[in-house]
Image (cartoon, grey):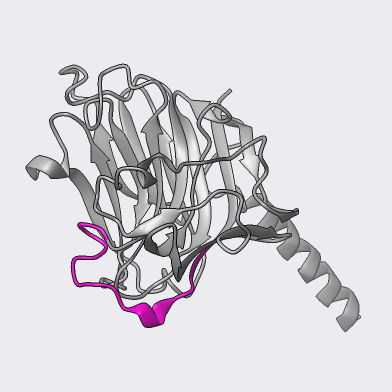
Amino acid sequence: MYLLIKTMCCFVMVIILSLSSGCGRNDTEWRLVWSDEFSYEGLPDPAKWNYDTVGNAFGWGNRELQFYTTGRKQNVFADGNYLHIIALKERFQGFDYTSVRLTTKGKGDWLYGRVEVRAKVPGGRGIWPAVWMLPTDWEYGGWPNSGEIDIMEHVGYNPDSVFVTVHTGAFNHAIGTQVGESIYLPSSESEFHVYAIEWHEDRIDFFLDNEHVFTFNNSGNGSEEWPFDKRFHLLLNVAVGGNWGGLHGVDDSIFPASMLVDYVRVYQKR
């Protein structure tokens, strides 16, 4: 009798967990349109991911210190459960560090929807992991005029927080007017969390583990304040140093430094 009751309790718990596993999206409202569960082994799926290396030639705009590599398993691989993006301390192509910057441009581009990424970030002074979005077509001009959506950023010298931010022509860090929120999250480096946005015509809502943490509203004042009516794509990367990440220098003892990604899922309204 005890075994039967225990089995029934476990069965009920499985049902409850299944119903609650939607990470904030309602299946009657959203439909899955793109995903990578990283259930394979080897390099990232080339049908879904590109390597962004263009900044290697002239230096990344944030004065980052890494060389972003292409198709190199030392810096990125899936192990059947997680994607690993690894920053290394090594001399490579004239740089002192290597890492990877993945994008979905041309393979995953969306206008509005829910984007969610379950990840665990690396820590340590000088590391700068991010989950973010950039415009695919840059129809309003170069950065920041066509916009940027930072779903999650973490700087290792500030280990107890993550940041969500929006950049536009009117609101950006170059002129000190960026709009966003600092979120206290002391477990970001030791536990997985779900970082998500729900992007609508009138606003972008930001979520952490299904909890709403910030909203950026469409002011109706044009593209200088709201360039988010064009399609965007997703980026995943681990930077080293830079204007923000390297504000207090780089601790070389932290390497290798890995961001683990459990899944990436994109939904749009039915």
Residue 237, percent from left and from top: 44, 53
Relative side of 100 to 250, left or right:
right
The quadrant of the image that shows the C terminus is top right
Residue 198, by quadrant, is top left
**Which residue occupies the foreground of this view, 206 or 255?**
255
Q: Relative to 34, say whether 61 is above or below.
A: below
Closer to us: 252 or 1: 252
Determine the image quadrant of residue 246: bottom left
Seen in the image, is 164 located left or right of residue 41?
Answer: left
Please say whether residue 224 is one of the residues in the magenta stretch.
Answer: no
What's the magenta bit mostly, secondary-structure-wise? loop
Q: Residue at x 46, y 59 (%)?
A: 99
Nearer to me, 214 or 127: 127
* Residue 207 relative to residue 19: left or right: left
Residue 210 visible from this viewpoint = no
Q: Residue at x 44, y 43 (%)?
A: 53
Q: How many marks?
A: 0
Q: What range is drawn magenta here?
A: 242-259
Please state the horizontal and vertical placement of residue 210, each as a whole percent of the image: 46, 52
Q: Is residue 36 above or below residue 239?
A: above
Q: Is residue 118 above or below residue 106?
A: below
